[in-house]
Image: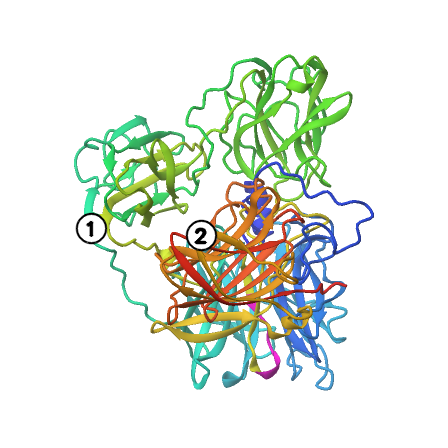
């Protein structure tokens, strides 16, 4: 269900604890404060027409089945907190897939297991014997994530009262292959073979297995599929279903959905799919042919004995190109010829930079191959890791905490010297010691408090890593500054073991007596903190680069960047050079990471007229946004419809989004179809039709609005709002980009939904959409391929209090993104850049709440 990027023990516990558990988060932004008297479902970022639990953490949708007039939505749920943990099945039902009724917890974790993702069926013929033919049971098939040892196996529970109460089967588990990465069963009745069919994931192996059974209890393995398509992360939450192609019921194809994390099209989590045939035992994907990249002028292929005019710093790249893997490295593949740049010389602990000579940009694209670690370039970071000078309050060297006072059991009796047992590699600390609260895993808690000191400099700098649980949240992992016993500054980790600088400006506190307290009050995933080198200084420490990347520099600034996929196999990447034509540029291959996968590989830099496409770009995606994952579909839907829903979040930052007392939403349910687009069969989607019941009064309308290199606000009743349903059609003229901006307002906030005519892509730009500094990967631009039809581009846009869902064309290009704008940002604008475009027609409805 989602692999969690957590410390090693938490990984065993969480990945086994992760039937959808990924967690890689970010920066110190506390959840939105909620007044004690704020009614539920009116909080600042609360979605109004997307399903959310009243409180606590939610992730994958589970158990989607229609029975006796009700659509059942079960979901991964933590009944005890607002971050991942204690995985259980929450439950809600709906008559229209829009309005939801909350029901009590369905399947609870217990002392032996957490209840990971799975599915539900109606056992019409009572093959299990759990009910009767007159009262057939609902049967849930879920992954048991065992707390002792981390094994994952498939189990059953059943209900004979329309899903209101559940009993776990005494014979669990029903499939146990001894794996700790075997999860997320999707079960359906396969009429041609008169048997139950299970589609289940071998997550780490990038495989899907198919099992059959006559009674849901005794299962036989029929076949496997994979690896195929994108494999940059674990495979989770598979789904398999048939659809008619272009509405022709005589032409049926099968769709295999495989959710992947990380390694999605927009980074992090995403829903991949394959189209093919299924014969009752085996799925065979349609052959998409081989890929040939665009030709061009090779500017560096690393085939010589040295790097030529390219220069190196550090030791990571060695004296010249590598011939493949170097000492201690796994097998390296995907490079061309005999040589490549490889920064694994000296292992992941070595760092260095490889820089090209300056050149004049003259080609539209720079294509190259890249591999190694997934550590993206982060804007604002520096390459100089020298610590700031000043008064060191603690460096945790010498084997003791000195005169700092510890409580609880998380800190032990002395500083750690690096990673603790069960923990992933810890990097970025100075010297030989650090405070590390992973002692005995995330289950331990405690505090570590400094003696009193006087603030006599402008800044307090320190290195911090570990869990992202801000001060003020229910169970923080935080560094706090206390003045007069009150917390006046705080910082937290980013759900990563690598430490990096945080800095407090304390100029206004000069002369005050203060203490620093390190707090670990969290026993869930990432429930620990790493801290080192606390220093009073007149210099603010800048975050140090921890990237493994290939960067394009123009005027000395990074303007394009790519990173690896935690893989020793190189793959194509491409930089769009057109905005920099005629300018001087350089290429830098950067390894500033000393932790796991702390290396980068590059080869075959080629100036070309067209972009090369990676395996990820060539794969098929149900959604091209950052926030659509664990997508699965309902069984038994009336009229043979296939409705799908996804978790509207991303494991890169999912546990850090600034919402409280709940965290995470589901997408709107979507009706799925197979259509032929540009000669290829594609999975398309559109919002469920009953969503239109939320439209308020008559729509705001606009027509024949021509804009030239500007933005125009839309005005009038219904043209603005926090929850909108917009239908718009544009005509291409000569504009490079055009579209709509939504949630515009406070301080220049805007979420840009546009079409790039030069690349034939739909895009969503959320770099200025509101709160986004909780994770460096959150701001950005997501794109989806979309060809105009007869010179026109058609959009359907759903805007909610904290999300946008954009359906381009006939649903072949979909982008789902969370946004966190100020409540006062309610404007809508039409825009064009680099020329003229015409808004032919627009209708915009304000949408009512499903909760009131």
Q: Is residue 372 above or below residue 399?
A: below
Quadrant holding the C terminus: bottom right
Quick one: 251 or 43, which is closer to the camera? 43
Q: Is residue 535 above or below residue 745?
A: above
Q: Which residue is at a point 42% across and 33% down the rendered structure image?
A: 593
Position in image of residue 592 (x %, y %): 40, 31
Magenta highlight range = 632-639
Mark 1 or mark 2: name the one nearer the start of the chain.
2
Quick one: 255 or 695, which is closer to the camera? 695
Q: Is residue 32 left or right of residue 216?
A: right
Instruction: Give the labeled residue for mark 1.
Output: 296
Classify mark 1: helix, strand or loop: strand
Position in image of residue 190 (x %, y %): 53, 80
Classify mark 2: helix, strand or loop: loop
Quadrant holding the N terminus: bottom right
Q: Which residue is at a point 38% across and 44% down the rendered structure image?
A: 564
Instruction: Give the labeled residue for mark 2.
Output: 263
């Amino acid at each position: 269900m989602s692999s969690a990027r957590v410390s090693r023990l938490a990984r065993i516990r969480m990945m086994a604890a992760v039937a959808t558990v990924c967690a890689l988060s970010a920066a110190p932004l506390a959840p939105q404060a909620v007044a004690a008297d704020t009614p539920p479902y009116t909080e600042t970022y609360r979605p109004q027409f997307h399903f959310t639990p009243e409180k606590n953490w939610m992730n994958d949708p589970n158990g989607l089945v229609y029975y006796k007039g009700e659509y059942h939505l079960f979901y991964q749920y933590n009944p005890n907190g607002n971050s991942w943990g204690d995985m259980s099945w929450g439950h809600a039902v709906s008559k229209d897939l829009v309005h939801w009724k909350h029901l009590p917890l369905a399947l609870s974790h217990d002392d032996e297991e957490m209840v990971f993702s799975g599915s539900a069926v109606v056992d019409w013929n009572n093959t299990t014997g759990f009910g009767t033919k007159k009262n057939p049971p609902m049967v849930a098939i879920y992954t048991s994530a065992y707390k002792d040892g981390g094994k994952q196996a498939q189990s059953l529970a059943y209900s004979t009262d329309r899903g209101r109460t559940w009993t776990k089967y005494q014979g669990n588990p029903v499939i146990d292959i001894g794996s700790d990465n075997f999860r997320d069963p999707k079960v359906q009745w396969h009429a041609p073979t008169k048997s139950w069919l299970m589609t289940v994931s071998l997550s780490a192996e990038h495989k899907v297995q198919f099992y059959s059974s006559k009674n849901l209890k005794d299962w036989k393995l029929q076949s496997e599929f994979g690896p195929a398509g994108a494999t940059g992360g674990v495979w989770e939450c598979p789904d398999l279903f048939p659809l008619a192609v272009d509405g022709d019921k005589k032409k049926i194809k099968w769709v295999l959905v495989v959710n992947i994390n990380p390694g999605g099209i927009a980074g992090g989590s995403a829903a991949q799919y394959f189209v093919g045939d299924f014969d009752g035992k085996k799925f065979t994907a349609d052959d998409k042919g081989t890929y040939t990249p665009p030709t061009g002028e090779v500017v560096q292929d690393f085939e010589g004995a040295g790097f030529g005019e390219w220069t190196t710093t550090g030791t990571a790249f060695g004296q010249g190109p590598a011939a493949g893997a170097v000492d201690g490295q796994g097998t390296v593949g995907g490079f061309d010829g005999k040589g490549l740049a490889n920064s694994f010389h000296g292992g992941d602990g070595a760092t260095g930079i490889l820089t090209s000579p300056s050149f004049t940009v003259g080609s539209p694209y720079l294509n190259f191959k890249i591999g190694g670690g997934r550590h993206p370039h982060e804007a604002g970071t520096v390459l100089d890791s020298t610590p700031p000078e000043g008064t060191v309050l603690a460096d945790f060297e010498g084997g003791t905490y000195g005169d700092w006072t510890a409580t609880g059991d998380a800190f032990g009796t002395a500083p750690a010297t690096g990673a603790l047992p069960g923990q992933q590699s810890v990097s970025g600390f100075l010297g030989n010691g650090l405070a590390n609260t992973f002692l005995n895993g995330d289950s331990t808690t405690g505090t570590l408090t400094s003696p009193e000191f006087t603030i006599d400099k402008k800044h307090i700098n320190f290195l911090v890593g570990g869990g992202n649980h801000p001060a003020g949240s229910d169970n923080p992992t935080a560094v706090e500054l206390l003045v007069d016993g009150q917390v006046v500054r705080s910082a937290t980790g980013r759900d990563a073991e690598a430490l990096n600088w945080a800095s407090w400006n304390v100029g206004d506190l000069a002369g005050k007596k203060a203490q620093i307290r390190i707090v670990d009050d969290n026993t869930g995933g990432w429930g620990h903190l790493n801290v080192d080198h606390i220093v009073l200084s007149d210099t603010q420490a800048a975050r140090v680069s921890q990237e493994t990347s290939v960067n394009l520099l123009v005027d000395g600034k990074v303007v394009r960047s790519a990173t690896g996929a935690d893989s020793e196999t190189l793959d194509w990447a491409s930089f769009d050079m057109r905005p920099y034509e005629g300018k001087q540029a350089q290429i830098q291959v950067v390894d500033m990471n000393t932790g796991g996968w702390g290396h980068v590989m590059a080869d075959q830099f080629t100036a070309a007229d067209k972009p090369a496409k990676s395996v990820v770009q060539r794969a098929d995606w149900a959604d091209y946004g950052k926030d659509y994952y664990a997508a699965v579909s309902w069984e038994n839907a009336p009229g043979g419809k296939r409705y799908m829903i996804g978790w509207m979040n991303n494991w890169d930052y999912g546990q850090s989004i600034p919402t409280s007392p709940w965290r995470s939403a589901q997408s709107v349910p979507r009706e799925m179809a197979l259509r032929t687009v540009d000669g290829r069969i594609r999975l398309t989607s559109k919002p469920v039709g009953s969503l239109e019941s939320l439209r308020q009064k008559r729509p705001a309308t606009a027509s024949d609005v021509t804009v030239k290199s500007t933005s125009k606000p839309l005005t009038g009743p219904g043209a603005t709002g926090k929850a909108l349903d917009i239908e718009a059609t544009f005509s291409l003229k000569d504009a490079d980009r055009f579209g709509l901006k939504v949630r515009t307002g406070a301080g220049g906030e805007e979420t840009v939904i546009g079409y790039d005519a030069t690349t034939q892509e739909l895009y969503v730009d959320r770099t200025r959409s509101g709160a986004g500094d909780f994770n460096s990967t959150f701001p950005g631009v997501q794109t989806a391929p979309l060809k105009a039809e007869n010179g026109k581009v058609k959009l359907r846009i759903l805007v909610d209090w904290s999300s946008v869902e954009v359906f381009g064309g006939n649903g072949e290009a979909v982008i789902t993104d969370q946004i966190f704008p100020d409540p006062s940002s309610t404007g809508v604008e039409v825009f064009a850049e680099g020329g003229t475009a015409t808004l032919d027609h627009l209708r915009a409805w304000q949408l009512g709440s499903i909760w009131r």
